[in-house]
């Protein structure tokens, strides 16, 4: 027997009583009368991100540059977004560590914790983490109340993980409290996040 | 006859300021957890569900592991199986050496601590860099973690600053286009975190491989889910092309629906946050990359057979039991002899090697606070109580307590003797304080010896009875 067979047979041998899977249908997660308002509040407080409301007719590129006037290198592969670097075509992935602002797309917003579901939609996902600052585009209509709803959408969808086998929830900038519990934004990954809420 | 834990705790408490700060820090985290729990009407339902899902999964673990491995392999992941720490270390070294890896960046994994992977790899000449800030601080200072989630909170900023300066981390500031000035407080946490950021980003860029642990494995999809606040697991797997996941076999859950329950509980319980900043799902190798998952047993399958302790397999390592534990908060991680401290560490240590780690079972006041905060409802303190009943069989019972128990057995089984002893007990009040409160009397440690009342409860009761009859 190889190790796999030995481990599996030990587990089967050592299992005594078995238990049924509970009915999760009875579990009702917290919901909000106005999930968008709750999402905005969580994003700008606990998550420590900025939020820009974008309406029809606004120039998204101008708003992004306005949010980061000091930035030099912008990176994105989203059609219509002006960028100096493209995570689909970048030669050495380490190049993305020089990016000032990475612009990416979120697909689900979660009101209870400001998480944004970001399925990998670019060749190099390093843009989501290595960029100094991150701009996440999200549609208002994509905001749900809680993680149960978010995972139900992910489970039902066949579009995520298809092109690239990775997806992540991001809630604000990278942070740490490892030195004397002092909260510091900008640990190893993005130091700042701006969420652009689009109609 | 004190245990190692009791002796180390006593030493630790000599520095009152340090001990008070440790206590306050972790009680603060416990209070944050409470606020999270109180904000959700469905909190107890979540805990029930989490416990039931885990009970179901660990009692069907072989089936779920097969499903998980088949799905991961279907996505092009190499899945390895390790029965113990040696096999695990050998597998990881083989993968690294066959890819000619010189430097590996690692996000936090208690499993690699359990198996002493870093020492194994370093002995073979591979540079292992921990990338969680707390873990990196400890690695540079050559210290062990004192907590499983917040491993370095016992280290003070001055020590961290000194360590960074000594190890040359400040050099990175100079190489910046726009050098950052050292602030007036050179040990300011924001500044030190920035210094570490530059240092660690350099490590990510130089590394040939990235290693992560796994908070959850999802059987239905083959996903490995890793939760961090710093984004270090993601940096470790976005720059180097080789990704190795180390996963204890008990980390499995059935599906994404279950994951929602655990994702909601993990950060709320562990650090008092609604979520970690990053919850990343790895379902296969990166374009042009390679992904390996090493599934590690190392004693877990034997725990399943233990009718009294199998439920420790439900644990998801959030650390809530440590934060709430009055003994942990006042004795800190290094007082324990197992590498995981606190209530869960006491139990896991006993399951690893009961004789060797028996010193830790004294580190519990049976207040049961841990049982009440545990998100998966492990009956931690009841299990510690059970271990204490087994100490005599292990040859690790405290001789003085054994003697006292024997004495009390005689006393309580002989009512006449009991009554006589009780009648004369106030005489002890007349003994000189120097004798009663001496170091020889264990009941007078940390406080003065109690005064025996003049009348016993029995006497008072009888008098009351007589009075009420007379009325």
Image (tube, helix red, strand yellow):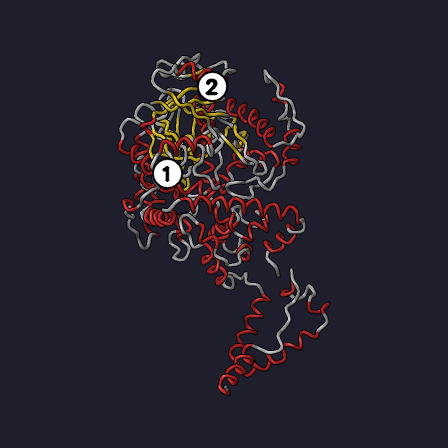
Q: Secondary structure beneath disc 2?
A: helix
Q: Residues within 10 Å of mark 1 (few under 14, many from 20)?
A: many
Query: Which quadrant does the N terminus of chain B fall into?
Result: bottom right
Q: CA distance from mark 1 to mark 2?
A: 38 Å
Residue behind mark 2: A67
Image label count: 2
Numbered tag placed on residue B217 in the rendering: 1
Spot occupied by residue B238 in the image (x, y as percentages of width and height): 44, 25
Q: Chain of mark 1?
A: B
Instruction: Determine the residue positioned at 65% across, 36% down.
Output: B159
- Where is residue B468? Give x, y as percent: 49, 83
Residue B33, above or below B188: below
Q: Chain of mark 2?
A: A
Residue B466 x, y percent position in the rendering: 52, 85
Closer to us: B177 or B125: B177
Query: Are the residues flagged by discs 1 and 2 from a single subunit?
Result: no
């Amino acid at each position: 027997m190889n190790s796999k067979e030995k481990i599996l047979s030990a587990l089967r041998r050592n299992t005594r009583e078995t238990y049924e899977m509970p009915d999760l249908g009875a579990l009702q997660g917290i919901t909000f009368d106005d999930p968008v308002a709750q999402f905005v509040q969580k994003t700008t407080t606990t998550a420590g991100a900025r939020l820009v409301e974008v309406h029809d007719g606004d120039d998204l590129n101008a708003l992004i540059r306005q949010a980061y006037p000091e930035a030099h290198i912008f990176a994105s592969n989203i059609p219509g977004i002006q960028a100096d670097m493209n995570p689909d075509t970048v030669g050495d992935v380490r190049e993305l560590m020089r990016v000032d602002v990475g612009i990416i797309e979120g697909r689900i917003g979660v009101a209870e914790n400001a998480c944004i579901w970001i399925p990998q939609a670019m060749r190099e996902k390093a843009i989501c983490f290595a960029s100094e600052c991150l701009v996440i585009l999200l549609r208002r209509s994509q905001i749900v109340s809680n993680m149960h709803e978010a995972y139900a959408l992910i489970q039902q969808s066949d579009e995520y993980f298809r092109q690239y086998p990775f997806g992540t929830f991001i809630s604000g900038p990278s942070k740490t409290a490892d030195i004397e519990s002092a909260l510091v934004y900008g640990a190893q990954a993005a130091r700042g996040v701006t969420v652009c809420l689009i109609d | 006859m004190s245990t190692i834990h009791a002796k180390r705790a006593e030493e630790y408490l000599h520095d009152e300021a340090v001990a008070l700060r440790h206590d306050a820090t972790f009680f603060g985290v416990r209070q944050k957890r409470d606020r999270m729990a109180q904000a959700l009407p469905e909190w107890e339902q979540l805990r029930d569900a989490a416990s039931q899902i885990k009970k179901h999964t660990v009692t069907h673990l072989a089936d779920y592991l097969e499903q998980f491995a088949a799905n991961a392999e279907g996505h092009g992941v190499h899945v390895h199986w390790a029965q113990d720490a040696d096999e695990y270390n050998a597998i990881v070294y083989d993968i690294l050496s066959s890819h000619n890896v010189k430097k590996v960046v690692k996000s936090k994994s208690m499993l690699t601590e359990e198996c002493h992977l870093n020492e194994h790899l370093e002995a073979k000449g591979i540079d292992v860099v921990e990338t969680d800030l707390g873990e990196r601080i400890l690695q540079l200072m050559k210290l062990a973690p004192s907590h499983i989630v917040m491993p370095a909170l016992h280290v003070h900023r001055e020590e961290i600053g000194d360590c960074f300066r000594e190890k040359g981390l400040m050099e990175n500031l100079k190489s910046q286009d726009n050098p950052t000035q050292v602030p007036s407080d050179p040990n300011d946490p924001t500044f030190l975190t920035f210094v570490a950021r530059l240092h660690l980003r350099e490590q990510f860029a130089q590394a040939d491989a990235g290693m992560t642990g796994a908070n959850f494995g999802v059987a239905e999809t083959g996903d490995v889910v890793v939760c961090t606040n710093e984004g270090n697991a993601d940096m470790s797997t976005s720059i180097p092309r080789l990704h190795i996941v180390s996963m204890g076999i008990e980390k499995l859950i059935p599906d994404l629906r279950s994951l929602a329950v655990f994702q909601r509980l993990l950060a709320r319980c562990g650090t008092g946050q609604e979520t970690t900043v990053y919850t990343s799902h790895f379902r296969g190798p990166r374009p042009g990359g390679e992904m390996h998952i090493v599934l590690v047993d190392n004693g877990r399958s034997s725990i399943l057979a233990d009718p009294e302790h199998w439920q420790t397999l439900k644990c998801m390592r959030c650390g809530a039991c440590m934060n709430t534990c009055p003994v942990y908060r006042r004795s800190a991680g290094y007082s324990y002899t197992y590498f995981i401290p606190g209530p869960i560490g006491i139990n896991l240590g006993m399951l690893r090697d009961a004789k060797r780690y028996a010193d830790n079972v004294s580190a519990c006041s049976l207040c049961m606070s841990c049982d009440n905060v545990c998100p998966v409802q492990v009956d931690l303190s009841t299990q510690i109580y059970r271990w204490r009943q087994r100490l005599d069989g292990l040859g690790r019972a405290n001789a003085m307590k054994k003697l006292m128990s024997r004495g009390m057995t005689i006393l309580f089984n002989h009512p006449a003797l009991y009554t006589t002893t009780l009648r004369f007990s106030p005489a002890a009040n007349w003994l000189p304080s120097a004798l009663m409160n001496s170091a020889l009397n264990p009941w007078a440690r940390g406080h003065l010896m109690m005064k025996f009342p003049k009348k016993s409860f029995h006497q008072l009761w009888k008098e009351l009875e007589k009075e009420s009859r007379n009325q």
